[in-house]
Amino acid sequence: MPVCRFFRYPIDFDSLLEAGAMMGSGGMVVMDEDTCMVDVARYFIDFTQKESCGKCTFCRIGTYHLLKILDRLTQGEGEEKDLELLESLSEDIKKGSLCGLGKTAPNPVLTSFKYFRDEYEAHVKEKRCPALMCRPIIAYYFDLELCARGCDACATCCPVDAVFTTRNRKKGVDQKLCVKCGECLVACPPEYDAVRKISPPGLVPVVERASEKEE
Amino acid sequence: MVALLVNDREIEAKNGTNVLQACLDNDIYIPHLCYLESLDLPSASCRMCFVEIAGEDKPATSCTTLVRDHMVIKTDTPAVRRLQRTALRLLLSVHRVDCKNCYAHKRCELQNIAKFLKVGLKSKPLNRYLKDTDIDEDHPFLNYYPNRCVLCGKCLHVCRNQHGQSVLTFANRGFNTVMSLYAAAEAPSPSCEDCARCVDICPVGALALKVNQEASIHHPTEK
Ligand code: SF4
Ligand code: SF4
Ligand code: SF4
Ligand code: SF4
Ligand code: SF4
Ligand code: FES
């Protein structure tokens, strides 16, 4: 739920249900703008889909389709029709399922869809993850203004050797090698804070390597 | 006896009857796959038999709703049809539709329901997700087709009714649920060869006696 609208909500089962959420035993998860709502919905559906007992049609097959659609969206492979399908299927699973599990399973989708529709659309239309969380549609790079000459922190920690050195001894990311693990983001010393994420990955600035000789 | 109004027509039914049975007895068709009259508690798993009841905010399954006097029911509202079409499309989205090579062709309940609801047998707009195995041939007398089974459970119930315990059982869970047949060695007693009640009750072409298969039907083509 977006905080601006609901921050006065008392947190108990009934009022959350009313607001379209579902409280499990896990308590409450607080999210900010670095949380991708599509990915969060995917996470919840992945959970309930695995919990489905398989008895009734809507929950057994329906939640599987929801998961597959959300998988596509977070991988930048969603199509416009997926959004319609996601919404109508969720409504039908809610109304059509036999027990409480299926009747509430689609809530995370419906709620996030209602309040964060723009995030869903960004994933489909621009293949962009506004929260910069969905790995397949983000890219890492180093801001050359901030990157410290001669610093090697990112290069040492990169598990796949994707970090290269530029002509003036700053760093660049080889996008073909990078597995988007985020290690460099953690390793870059806070006084430089040069690691950036961007989505869609096509927007990543081109950085030139130092030629073999110079290196 | 109670009197109820179904699609503006008055019908009568015995107390304790469910709405689905009452309608079927009066030639009012409601799509259904898992309902068995002989079952005390309906499994209500196919989620196909929805109707709208005056005073209730969303469609209810008719097999689990008992008749009440003066009940007002509609079997063909947009909300009902929407749920039924979605249920059917979901079933078709995990179904290998190859009717020409299926012995149930032309007497298949899924075909009938699709025709009734005017839904094509393609699962559009849903993607199709099929199981790896098309035929389970482990049982000495029966073949089982996971990609045709709608998991209505009727086979299990008729077998149990007949023999006290069932050769068939649900196996796995969630999306991977299938029917499973105990191998002959572990099977308690019934001789499936002379029985075949499950084959007869199956609303689709998901169970077949091996002998009949070999005589007349060829296997579905692998695609
Ligand atoms: S809604 Fe309930 S009964 Fe139906 S498959 Fe899900 S968990 Fe099972
Ligand atoms: S995100 Fe991971 S793989 Fe990519 S450059 Fe940084 S450390 Fe290397
Ligand atoms: S069970 Fe057989 S006849 Fe029925 S829809 Fe499937 S392939 Fe066609
Ligand atoms: S043939 Fe008869 S005994 Fe064998 S599984 Fe079917 S119903 Fe049960
Ligand atoms: S094999 Fe036939 S009767 Fe048994 S659950 Fe599947 S569809 Fe129903
Ligand atoms: S016949 Fe009522 S749910 Fe299957």
Image: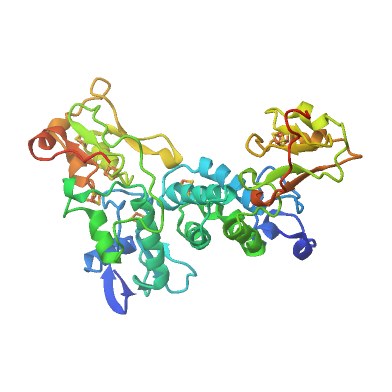
Q: Is residue B159 left or right of residue B48?
A: left
Q: Is residue A65 left or right of residue A28?
A: left
Residue B197, quarter of the rendered image: top left
Q: Tell me which residue sits at (40%, 69%) in the image.
A: B52
Q: Position of residue A91 (x, y in %)?
A: 51, 61
Q: Position of residue B11 (x, y in %)?
A: 27, 73
Please state, as top left, top right, bottom left or bottom right, where the N terminus of chain B lies in the image: bottom left
Q: Position of residue A101 (x, y in %)?
A: 53, 49
Q: How many marks?
A: 0
* Residue situated in front as seen by the camera: B213 or B44: B213
Q: Furthest-left residue in view? A: B215
* Residue situated in front as seen by the camera: A33 or B36: A33
Q: Tell me which residue sits at (59%, 49%) in the image.
A: A74
Please state, as top left, top right, bottom left or bottom right, where the C terminus of chain B lies in the image: top left
Q: Is residue B121 above or below residue A55?
A: below
Q: Furthest-front residue in view? A: A213
Q: Is residue B221 left or right of residue B91?
A: left
Q: Is residue B102 visible?
A: no
Q: Position of residue A166 (x, y in %)?
A: 78, 36
Q: Furthest-right residue in view? A: A191
* Residue situated in front as seen by the camera: B122 or A182: A182
Q: Is residue B170 left or right of residue A1?
A: left
Q: Tell me which residue sits at (75%, 28%) in the image.
A: A213
Which quadrant contains ligand 6?
A: bottom left
* Residue situated in front as seen by the camera: B7 or B218: B218
